Image (tube, rainbow, N blue to C red):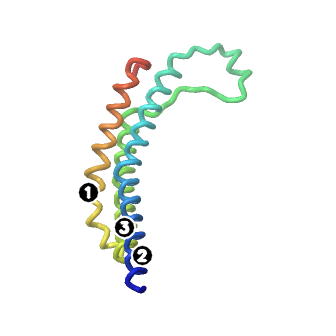
Amino acid sequence: EQFIVDKKIKAAITMYIIFIFSAAAIITPMLLGLSSVLVEILRSSIAQIDIPSSAVSALPISIGAINISADFLRTYIITFLIVNGFLASSLLGLISRGKQREGLRYFVPLVLLAIPIFLISKYLIQSVLSGLFTF
């Protein structure tokens, strides 16, 4: 009976490890790729809109230019992915072995997967939407 309980606990821990690893290495970079494309679409769309000043004063919100450059956003996302990889690897070490240090072996694979997946997903989303929007 104890052996069966131990196997169930190990299976649950393995499931947590797979989920956290896939969330940090695959899902997060894909969502950030989509977000960066959406920011570029909004930035170019809002720049093309010419709203008269009388209409702007009647609106309950203010619409202004987006002052975030594409280089800043890309640098921020890559930095975020590196920090996220470190924190996820620490969490994986804590869950699997009971020590945060043990998770540092996951750090390099996480980062080596996350950054290319971000860049590839951003490129694919831009190429799919390039016919609809101009970047």
Dot 1: element: helix
The numbered mark, 3 or 1, whose residue comes first in the sequence reads 3
Residue 129 appears at what percent x and percent y? 40, 24
- What type is the residue that disc 3 sits on? Thr
CA separation in Å, label 3 and label 1? 17 Å
The numbered mark, 2 or 3, whose residue comes first in the sequence reads 2
CA separation in Å, label 2 and label 3? 9 Å
Please tell me in which quadrant of the rendered image residue 108 appears: bottom left
Q: Is residue 34 above or below residue 112?
A: above
Residue under label 1, please give it.
109
Q: Residue at x 39, y 62 (%)?
A: 87
Please tell me in which quadrant of the rendered image residue 52 appears: top right
Q: Which mark is residue 9?
A: 2
- What type is the residue that disc 1 sits on? Pro
Residue under label 3, please give it.
14
Quarter of the rendering occupied by the C terminus:
top left
Q: Residue at x 34, y 76 (%)?
A: 97
Q: Residues within 10 Å of mark 2 (few under 14, many from 20)?
A: few
- What type is the residue that disc 2 sits on? Ile
Q: Which mark is residue 74?
A: none
